[in-house]
Amino acid sequence: MTDVVIPGGEPYFSPGGPLGVLLLHGFTSTTSTVLDLARRCAAAGYTVSAPRLPGHGTSVDDLMTTGWDDWSAAAEAAYDELTATCERVAIVGLSMGGTLAVHVASLRPDVAAFVFINPYVKHQGVEWDELAQTMLDAGVFTYDSIGSDVKKEGVLETSYAQTPIAPALTLLEAVKIVNANLGTITAPSLLLNSTEDHVVEVDNGDELVKKSNGPVERIWLDNSFHVATLDNDHELIESAALAFLSGHLGR
């Protein structure tokens, strides 16, 4: 794997007080999608970590060598790093970051609170698995980029220009298990849901509301697509997340 990280793909860590916030980015994306929120959390006094997930922020070839086991292990390690110095830790997850947040919750029941932004938590059907496998069998290893689903004019997400199929297939398989583990969430959650999303179907949010065993506060985002943290509703997201964390994590 290359050591060259593309601008905007660097991990972010800011030491602060005894309360921690872990921010997890999405598939083929980078920490740039959660960086503004991470900085605001740091300014509020939290200890903040936004790790660069394995294979991300460098090249598609690097991502091709990774899969769900690598990303989930990195999320667990980042959470454990925070809990080693923090009394309580909340997790913020965007897209696949939300998938990873549920995974961590299933293994670490002490997560204090969650902020989900257009999370991927519902398997969309076997036809997607079969299509991905058919493409691989035919020697097709990438398809079009899923990045930059942003409504705001002139905004581009720092993400890969192609989506590697084999790693994506590991995510499709993992989300089935993650969905079954939604009930392990007992802490309060804030769900920020775009009304129009071209990457993750909106009913993923419905699944979280239905299956979580903790209270879920839902805010609809009417002026943003999938990467809402970079979109027209970014200020609403940041303000709502900070208020939620203050109320349920403390500061």
Image (cartoon, helix red, strand yellow):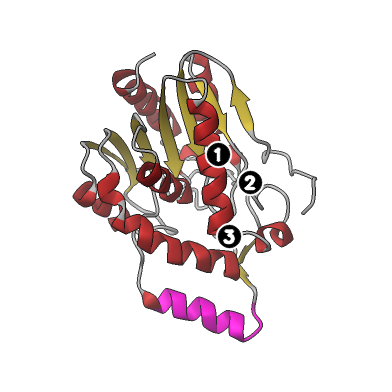
Q: Position of residue 139 (x, y in %)?
A: 66, 83
**Cβ–Cβ under 8 Å for marks 1 and 2:** no
**Disc 2 versus disc 3: distance between alpha carbons?**
20 Å
**Disc 1 versus disc 3: distance between alpha carbons?**
16 Å
**Cβ–Cβ under 8 Å for marks 1 and 3:** no
Which mark is in front, 1 or 3? 1
Which mark is in front, 2 or 3? 3
Q: Nearer the viewer, residue 197 or 94?
A: 94
Q: Secondary structure at mark 3?
A: loop
Going by the numbered disc 3, the residue's amino acid type is Gly
Mark 3 residue crowding within 10 angstroms, few (<14) / some (14–19) / many (20+): some
The image quarter in which residue 185 lies: top left
Q: Residue at x 42, y 50 (%)?
A: 99
Residue picked out by circle 2:
158
Q: Secondary structure at mark 2?
A: loop
Q: Position of residue 31 (x, y in %)?
A: 59, 39
Q: Which residues are magenta?
A: 127-140
Going by the numbered disc 1, the residue's amino acid type is Ala
Residue picked out by circle 3:
67
In what quadrant of the picture does the N terminus appear? bottom right
* Above-or-below relation of 43 to 205: above
Residue picked out by circle 1:
77
* N-term mark: 1 or 3: 3
Residue furthest to the bottom in view is: 138
* Above-or-below relation of 91 to 209: above
Q: Left or right: where does residue 111 sit relative to residue 30? A: left
Q: Nearer the viewer, residue 150 or 48?
A: 48
The image quarter in which residue 146 lies: bottom right
Q: Residue at x 57, y 81 (%)?
A: 135
Q: Nearer the viewer, residue 97 or 151?
A: 97
Q: Residue at x 54, y 65 (%)?
A: 168
